[in-house]
Image (cartoon, rainbow, N blue to C red):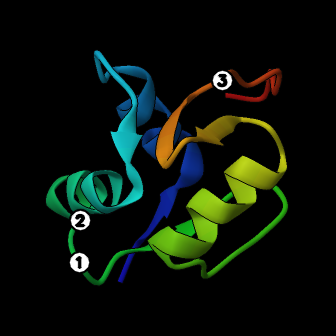
Amino acid sequence: MESVHGHNVLNLVKEQEAALTKENLMSAIAEAFGTDARYHTCSARDLTADELVSQFVEKGKLVEADGMIQYHGCNCHCH
């Protein structure tokens, strides 16, 4: 199975018109990349969608507030 780069998920979130619940975000990710997809970033490999989203929240690329998740930004210039 091919691994999906995390920036593809960030772009998916960025394209949303409004913040999403985590459940809706997980559904959108599964719809876009498949329920069994694995993900990688520049610093991590073989992540589940949930692990990837958690990593992005921890790094400030996604913001989770009041049960909603939205794109915050990415200052990584490698992609």
Around disc 3, counting alpha carbons within 10 Å, would you say few (fewer than 14), some (14 to 19), or many (20 or more)? some
Amino acid type shown at disc 1: Thr
Residue 51 x/y as whole percent:
61, 74
Residue 31: which quarter of the image?
A: bottom left
Amino acid type shown at disc 2: Ala
**Circle 1 sits on which residue?**
35
Q: Earlier in the sequence, mark 2 or mark 1?
A: 2
- Determine which of the numbered discs, if any, sits on residue 72 in the image: 3
Judge left or right: residue 14 versus residue 74.
left
State yes or no: discs 2 and 1 in contact (Cβ < 8 Å): yes
Judge left or right: residue 21 versus residue 53.
left
**Circle 2 sits on which residue?**
30
Residue nearest the observer in this picture, 21 or 28: 21
Per the image, label 1 sits on a secondary structure element best described as loop
**Mark 1 vs mark 3, CA separation in Å:** 25 Å
Residue drawn where x is 23% and y is 65% of the image: 30
Residue 75 x/y as whole percent:
82, 21
Residue drawn where x is 25% and y is 53% of the image: 24
Residue nearest the observer in this picture, 65 or 53: 65
Per the image, label 3 sits on a secondary structure element best described as loop
Residue drawn where x is 45% and y is 45% of the image: 9
Amino acid type shown at disc 3: His
